[in-house]
Image (tube, rainbow, N blue to C red):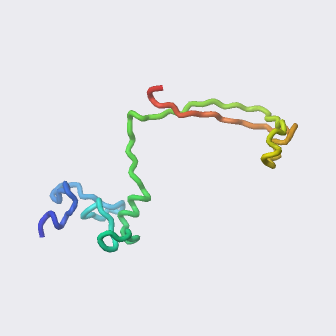
Amino acid sequence: MTSDTQFPVSGYDPQASEVPTTSQGTPLAYTERSLKVGRRGPTLLADHHLREMTTNPDYERIPERVVHVRGAGAHGTFVGNGAAAAFCRAGFLAKGVETRLFARFSTVVGSRG
């Protein structure tokens, strides 16, 4: 058997010290294909590596797109004026009902402002 038939992923070097493995440490011969029924059939649930990769995605941090949350808060008393009575049954929106509240308003701002 040649190296190409044993390890079908292009660029994979079987002599390299780092072998791709599952999260439990089982070595993998290939990582870019999934088990299917036939050539164009559905993906099998028996493909444990594919299920592991889709349930635990590997997110890459992009340093130039770091975002910062900025915002403000307000607290006080909300007094309903009855304008929403025709549209909903929420008691705190009825005319003259006072409700204590705290609201937080936030926005996400990129690194460029």
Position of residue 16 in the picture relative to residue 90 (left or right): left
Outermost residue, bottom direction? 38
Looking at the picture, tell me which residue is in the foreground, 53 or 95. 95
Looking at the picture, tell me which residue is in the foreground, 78 or 43. 43
The residue located at (23%, 55%) in the rendering is: 18
Q: Residue 66 placed where, x, y %? A: 44, 34
Q: Residue 104 placed where, x, y %? A: 65, 35
Image vertical order of residue 32 relative to residue 88, above or below: below
The residue located at (38%, 51%) in the rendering is: 58
Q: Residue 45 placed where, x, y %? A: 40, 70
The residue located at (77%, 32%) in the rendering is: 76
Outermost residue, right direction? 96
Count of numbered tags:
0
Position of residue 60 in the picture relative to residue 30 (left or right): right
Outermost residue, left direction? 2
The residue located at (38%, 35%) in the rendering is: 63
Image vertical order of residue 36 relative to residue 77, above or below: below
Residue 62: image quadrant is top left
